[in-house]
Amino acid sequence: MKPFFFPVIALLALQACSEPEAEKPKETPKASRLSVVDSLFGDLVIEDTFYVYSSWGGSENHPFKGTPMDSLQVASLTHDLKMSYSYFKDVGACYKFPLDASRFALIARVPGEYASTAVNLFVFDVEKDSVVQTLHLADVFGDAGESMSYSSCIFREKDHSLKVATQWHSEYSHSVDNENDTTVERWNRFWIFGLSKHTGDTLLKDSATIVNSYPQIMRGLSHY
């Protein structure tokens, strides 16, 4: 019996080894998160200064109204924005510009305290395929005698580096507590941020020094 079965088993083993393996289906390359939203953001070139500000009314003509984004597109940015979108469902893609060979800045109108009045800058790292940092550029808020607004100017220094100057303004009217008290308290603060490899680093926060060092930019911010 052995001389008969051994050749048959050997033949079957030889056939099994000689049969080509079934080709595995090719995996479809996963689309990058940036490619999902890239076309929504308008290209921006910053040669000198670019002011970013918010609007109380969300006018259709406001330069930071932006192109509406859906839930899938919003999810390509940050988890926090995705969660906020579930409540407001109002996010607008505004502008984009390169920071270096692997990072882009995306400017979008996003949910604020009561509505989508805020404007944020998202730093998107192409190699990591994700947003790695968020800067708050502008917003407006008002409630019960208190109002707050902040606006920013993205500007290019003489060495061509990009920085962000932010002005924060707040007011409180005492008339909300006493109609005969017309006192209005006002506060102004200023910051300078860097848009280098360490995006968002606070380079300067002494308001007096900032006002004296960047008088033209400060005058521009006072209009918003």
Image (cartoon, rainbow, N blue to C red):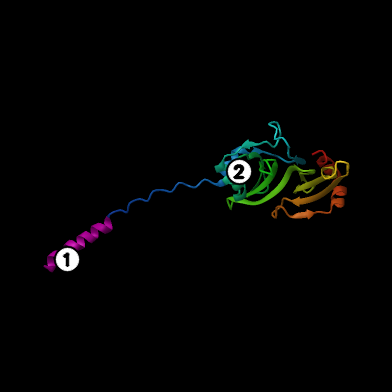
Q: Residue furthest left?
A: 1
Q: Amino acid at mark 1?
A: Phe
Which residue is more in the foreground, 224 or 30? 224
Report if residue 136 lies within the magenta region: no
Residue 110 screen position, x and y as percent: 66, 43
Provide the secondary structure element on which disc 1 rests: helix
* Dot 2 crowding, Cα within 10 Å, few <14, some 14–19, many 20+: few
Q: Which residue is mark 2?
A: 87
Residue 101 screen position, x and y as percent: 64, 49
The label nearer to you, 1 versus 2, is 2
Sequence-wise first label, 1 or 2: 1
Q: Which residue is mark 1?
A: 6
Number of numbered discs visible in the structure rendering: 2
Report if residue 17 lies within the magenta region: yes
**81 left or right of 174?**
left
Provide the secondary structure element on which disc 2 rests: helix
Which residue is more in the foreground, 93 or 176? 176
* Dot 1 crowding, Cα within 10 Å, few <14, some 14–19, many 20+: few
Q: Amino acid at mark 2?
A: Tyr
Kindly report the distance in space between the C-alpha atoms of the residues bearing marks 1 and 2.
73 Å
Taking the spot 81% from the left edge, 41% from the top edge, the residue there is: 221
Taking the spot 70% from the left edge, 31% from the top edge, the residue there is: 61
Q: Which residues fall within the magenta stretch?
A: 1-18
Residue 220 is marked as: none
Quarter of the image with the N terminus is bottom left
Residue 138 screen position, x and y as percent: 73, 43
Quarter of the image with the C terminus is top right
Residue 121 screen position, x and y as percent: 68, 46
